[in-house]
């Protein structure tokens, strides 16, 4: 019940302004995912705290895999019959999360749903968690990403640690295979549920630089019993004894991992639970493990949760497939060396000839510093016999073309198409699968063209 009437009026005006802004932007064909929240926060800086009160919230944060993991969890919640909403548009900053809560609440601030599933940017998580008392916090991983915005991995880790310190009542679902995110379970009063993969994922892997080669406690080099990718795997420090925690939810076996899906066996509480993951790529096995850990934290049926992994729809631009006039286009968002190398790991298992497209932008949401492309093992891609040709696009198309030239790709097999509309028209003429690897703003631009010209849903739908 409201006792502070001036505060009530501010909250109501904030929600109303947010809803009207969002509606107006949608009518104009814009996403309306961030600006309405900024308006709401200007009118009432703590409106998110009011909106999120008494809502059971799951927060998903980390460097890679947040959106896909959230879509998996969303399917788990839907199949369990839970009333929820999610920020599926990818609006994961404080303003975007505020806008989503306002959009799904009444003018008096009462949420229309019992649960909220919120993807939180790893830098914004510490601000979001000040207002949202999460029931579950899931951390996917910590990798080097957009140095101009996030800084080194230690800075990202500290930001997430601050967010966890605000989340006093949350069950923490942490990646046991990541020495960085795994360390977040040390010295906290929260219940901690570790998840991981107990076996190598790839037969062969692209060359990668580790983002965490040394022990967090004594700075001695880790020894690995196995590596899944990047710095993830069965790590241990031979000097001080810090090692991978034993996961309560783990992938015990990878049975199949092809261009369509992965079939795995989960180990939970001594039981084996089979699952088909409705996306290819070894990194999506980790996303599925995160979703299973969240289901465990929410005390949902693990067998039903495993079935949901075979039915969910991928997030926009994350392994999203477009079938246009007989052509097959798959869009895979990339933003850092670790994620990009995992796309290449996926492609090395592709048996049929394909066309590869790289769209590189350097806008604020992509990261201004594009030097990270030189840390990606594109030499491995260029050496593949299945690769027919490479097309580059985006603001930094020339940088991408130069990177492929130095990787050994003949220049007559590197095509530059700067206009997105022309690019899509060219790609749908191909008689072989096309894999498009865009950075964030390039992905939005490409999806805008595909939505407008070929009848697909807009990214916020």
Image: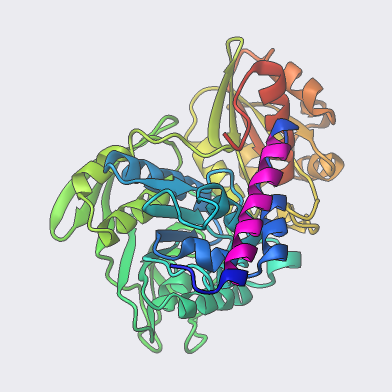
- Residue displayed at 53% across by 48% down: 87
**Percent x, y for residue 278?**
38, 34
Q: In the image, is residue 136 above or below residue 450? A: below
Res. 65 in view: no
Q: Name the residue nearer the viewer: 214 or 65.
A: 65
**293 with respect to 127 (left or right):** left
Snapshot quadrant of residue 308 = top left
State the predominant SS element of the stretch in magenta: helix
**Percent x, y for residue 49?**
53, 68
Q: Name the residue nearer the viewer: 367 or 107.
A: 107
Res. 44 in view: yes
In the image, is residue 21 part of the stretch drawn in magenta? yes
Q: In the image, is residue 448 above or below residue 243? A: above
- Residue displayed at 32% across by 67% down: 194
In this picture, which residue range is highlighted in magenta? 7-26
**376 with respect to 221 (left or right):** right
**Percent x, y for residue 39?**
72, 57
Quarter the C terminus occupies = top right
Colouring scheme applied when the structure was drawn = rainbow
Snapshot quadrant of residue 37 = bottom right
Quarter the N terminus occupies = bottom left
Snapshot quadrant of residue 408 = top right
Q: Name the residue nearer the viewer: 321 or 239.
A: 321
**Percent x, y for residue 240?**
39, 89
């Amino acid at each position: 019940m409201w006792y502070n009437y001036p505060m009530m009026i501010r909250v109501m005006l904030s929600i109303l302004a947010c809803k009207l802004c969002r509606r107006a932007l949608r009518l104009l064909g814009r996403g309306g995912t961030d600006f309405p929240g900024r308006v709401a926060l200007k009118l009432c800086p703590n409106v998110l705290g009011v909106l999120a009160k008494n809502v059971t919230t799951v927060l998903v944060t980390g460097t890679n895999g947040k959106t896909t993991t959230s879509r998996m969890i969303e399917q788990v919640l839907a199949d369990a019959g839970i009333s929820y909403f999610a920020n599926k548009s990818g609006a994961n900053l404080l303003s975007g999360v505020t806008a989503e809560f306002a959009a799904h609440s009444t003018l008096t601030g009462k949420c229309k749903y019992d649960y909220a599933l919120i993807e939180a940017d790893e830098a914004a998580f510490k601000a979001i968690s000040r207002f949202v008392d999460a029931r579950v916090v899931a951390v996917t991983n910590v990798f080097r990403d957009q140095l101009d915005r996030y800084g080194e991995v230690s800075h990202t880790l500290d930001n997430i640690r601050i967010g966890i310190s605000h989340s006093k009542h949350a069950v923490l679902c942490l990646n046991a295979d990541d020495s960085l995110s795994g360390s977040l379970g040390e010295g906290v009063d929260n219940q901690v549920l570790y998840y991981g993969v107990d076996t190598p994922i790839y037969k062969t892997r692209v060359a990668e630089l580790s983002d965490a080669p040394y022990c967090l406690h004594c700075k001695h080099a880790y020894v690995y019993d196995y590596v899944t990718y990047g710095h993830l795997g069965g790590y241990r420090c031979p000097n001080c004894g810090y090692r991978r925690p034993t996961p309560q939810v783990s992938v015990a076996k990878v049975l199949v991992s092809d261009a369509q899906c992965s079939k795995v066996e989960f180990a939970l509480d001594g039981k084996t639970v089979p699952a088909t993951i409705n996306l290819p790529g070894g990194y999506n096995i980790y996303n599925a493990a995160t979703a299973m850990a969240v289901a465990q934290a929410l005390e949902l049926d693990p067998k039903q949760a495993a079935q949901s992994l075979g039915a969910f729809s991928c997030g926009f631009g994350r392994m999203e497939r477009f079938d246009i006039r007989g052509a097959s286009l798959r869009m895979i968002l990339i933003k850092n060396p670790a994620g990009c190398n995992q796309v290449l790991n996926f492609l090395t298992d592709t048996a049929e000839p394909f066309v590869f497209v790289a769209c590189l932008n350097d806008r604020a949401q992509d990261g201004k510093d594009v030097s990270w492309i030189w840390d990606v093992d594109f030499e491995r891609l260029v050496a593949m016999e299945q690769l027919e040709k490479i097309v580059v696009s985006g603001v930094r198309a020339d940088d991408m073309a130069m990177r492929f030239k130095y990787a050994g790709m003949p220049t007559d097999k590197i095509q530059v198409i700067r206009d997105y509309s022309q690019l899509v028209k060219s790609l749908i003429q191909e008689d072989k699968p096309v894999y498009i690897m865009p950075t964030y703003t390039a992905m939005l631009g490409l999806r805008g063209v595909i939505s407008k010209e070929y009848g697909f849903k807009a990214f916020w739908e």
